[in-house]
Amino acid sequence: MICVIQARMSSSRFPKKMMAKILGKTLIERVVNQVSKSKYIEKIIVVTSKLKSDQPIVDFCKKKKIDFFVGSLNNVAKRYFDALKNINYDYFIRINGDSPLIDPNLIDKFITYSKKKNFDIITNCLDKTFPKGQSIEIIKIKIFRKFYKNIKKKYDKEHPTSFFYKNKNKFKIKNIYYKQNFNLINLCIDKPEDMIIIRKILKAFNNKVPKIDMIINKYNRILKS
């Protein structure tokens, strides 16, 4: 299984956030490290843009010997399509680069499910019940390639899987639900202030990332304190 991590430095709400440090490690490093803990992911590719501002992401990948691809900034669907051109896997996993607490055990559960069932997309993003920052999408590569030419609207180009969700009746999509609806919990880094609670969670677990249940419990206790 191949994992594609989407990352850029030109976020309007938090510029250069991929190089922002959380307890000594950059955001991109934390995401890559978490994904690397998966039992089933054989290859990771970081997809970023050709903008000069994204060069630090490229430099990080080179230093850590991580595969990367540079492409269109705004047409993210094309960035994915081009990055996957010569990839010989049945599926790819899409993980956002703003998810430092992404749970590899959760990733492996999704991958296991994909091996047992023949879906075009396995996701927890169609009907969201997982905390923000725990989004996982597993997409059949031949389906993405086949329908890429139909992704024409600006919003869908910026959000590569939205086209498939809008046309869900045409595809075999399985949405995975959490046992409770925790979508209001924010575990991603969208704004600088999001770093505060992530740091508190990591400090509580000696700078290690626990499983999602433990993260949610700690998050709720922090909010109440």
Image (cartoon, helix red, strand yellow):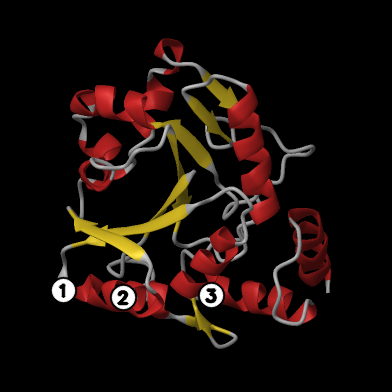
Q: Farthest residue toward the bottom?
A: 24
Task: Find disc 3 in the rendering and name its residue.
Answer: 193
Residues at marks 3 and 1 touching, judged by CB atoms closer than 8 Å: no
Residue at point 43%, 56% (across, down): 44
Could you say which disc has been placed on residue 52 in the image?
A: 1
Mark 2 or mark 1: which comes first in sequence?
1
Can residue 183 be seen here? The reply is no
Question: Which is more foreground, mark 3 or mark 1?
Answer: 1
- Which secondary structure, mark 2? helix
Q: Can you give x and y, in whole percent of width and height, for residue 82 in the image?
A: 21, 44
On the image, numbered disc 2 is attached to which residue? Answer: 62
Amino acid type, residue under disc 1 in the picture: Lys
Instruction: State the image quarter where residue 174 is shown.
Output: top right
Question: Three-letter amino acid code at disc 2?
Answer: Lys
- Residue at 56% in and 66% down: 100
Q: Position of residue 192 (x, y in %)?
A: 48, 75
Q: Is residue 147 left or right of residue 18?
A: left
Count of picture labels: 3
In this rendering, the answer to whether 212 lies above or below 117 is below
